[in-house]
Image (cartoon, grey):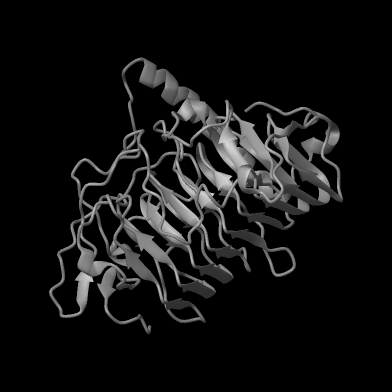
Amino acid sequence: MRLRRGRQDADHLRWPPLMADRLYRRLTIVGLALVLVALAGAGVVSRFGVSPTGAAAPDGTTNANGPGATGQPSTTGSSPSPRPTATPTPIATTPGRTTAPPGPGPGPGPLPPPPNGFPDASTTGYRNAPGYPGKLTRFTGSVQSNKTYKFMEFPDGAYLQGISNVTFIGCRFTSNEVVDATVVIFGDNITFQYSSFEPVGTPGAARTVNYGNGYQYAIDQRGSGNFTVEHSDFWGWGNAIQFGASNQANPVIVKDSWFHHPRTDGGVDHTDAILESYGGPSYMIFDHNTIVGVGNTNGLALQGKDYSNVTITRNYFSGFGYTVNAGGNGSGNRNVRFVGNTFGTDLRPVYGPLYGWRDGSGNLWRQNKWHIAAGGYSSRSEDNGKYWWPDGSLRTTDYTG
C-alpha cells in the first residue's frame, strides 16, 4: 500500500480502534494480491470461483430465493473466499405468484440506462453540478476545515484527517490506488455533492476497466464521524464506499447517486458498491440511488449483524452476486426499512437478488417492485411491476410479513 504525503508523521501512526482489524486485513490483502499476481503470471491461478469479468457461475444457474440459499458472502471487501454454489429454483405455478427466472445476463460492456427517474449520467457527477463552469481547477495544497470546495480536480484523491465541516461540490476525485482508497476519511461532517470518483485518466464515458487500472475504494471511512454523499457518480472501483461508523448523531447518508461499472475483480476483489463488514452501525440512510454492476458480491453490502434504524428506500438495484445484503442473515437487526425499492433485470445476479431478511423487531419490507429491463436477462413482461417479496417470489399483492 502506498503511503500518502503526510502519513509518516507520528500523529498518523496512532490508528484509531475502528481501524485496527481493517489494517490487519488490508495488509493481508496486499500480500495475497502479490501472491495471486505471481501465480497468475506462472499460469497456476487464473481466478477464484467467478471470472475476473464478474460473469455468472459456469453452470449458468441462479438462486432467486436469497433467504433460502446456503453460504454467506464474505465479510471483507476484497479478500477472496469460496463463493456459495447456486441452486436452480423452479418457477412457481401458484396463481398470482411467480419466481424470478434464471437466464443469461449481458457481459461488462455498455449497461442499459436505469428507468426514468433514477440517478444516471444526466443527474450525477461534476458535469451536472449547478453552476458548473465547463472546466475544473486543479487542487493544490491541503484541505482545510470549515471550507467549501467547488469545481476542483483532485488528481491523487484526498486524505481527510483531523478536519470537519467540509463540503465538496462539483469535484472530480481520481486515483489508481489498486489496493487502497481514493478518498480516506478520518474527519467529521464531510459532504460530497455532484462529485465524480473515477480511475486516473482523461475524463470520458464510464467503462469497465481491468483490475490494475481501477482503485480499491472511492471513499473509505477510517474513523468515527459522519459523511454524506449526494448526486455523485462512482465507477472503476472494487468497493465504491466502505464505512464502519454511523449513529444517530453522526449518520452515514448516501442518496441520489449512481454506482456502476466496477472494475474487473482480478481474482482478488469481492466487489461491493456500498460495504459495511462488521455490523453494529445505525441510522444509515440509502435513498434513491442506482446501484448496478457486474460483480461477485453485493450492491448494497451490509454484511455484519445488529444493524438498527436503517433506511433503504427508492433505490434501483441490479446485478452483483447477491444483489442486496440487508444485514447478513438478519440476526439482531432492528428497525430496518426496505421500502419502495426496485430490482431490475438489467444484469442477472450470480446467486440471487437478496441475501437474508428477517421480519420482526420493527423491520419493514413494503412496496418493493420488479422491473423487466429492455435488453436484460428476462423477457417475462408479465412480471414487470409485480411486488418483490423477500423470499424471492413475485406477486400481484404486496408483502405484509
Drawn side of residue 89 relative to residue 391, left or right: left
Image quadrant of residue 137? top right
Could you tell me residue 56's position as x and y percent? 27, 44
Image quadrant of residue 44? top left
Drawn side of residue 142 relative to residue 130, left or right: right
Asked if one can make out residue 257 in the rendered structure from this viewpoint, the answer is yes
- Residue located at (50% from left, 26% from top): 213
- Residue located at (36% from left, 70% from top): 369
Q: Quadrant of the C terminus?
A: bottom left
Drawn side of residue 261 relative to residue 215, left or right: left
Figure check: 354 above or below 197: below
Could you tell me residue 286's position as x and y percent? 56, 63
Q: Quadrant of the N terminus?
A: top right
For this orientation, the residue located farthest to the left is 93
Could you tell me residue 377's position as x and y percent? 24, 52
- Residue located at (27% from left, 61% from top): 64
Asked if one can make out residue 355 in the rendered structure from this viewpoint, the answer is no
Could you tell me residue 400's position as x and y percent? 37, 84
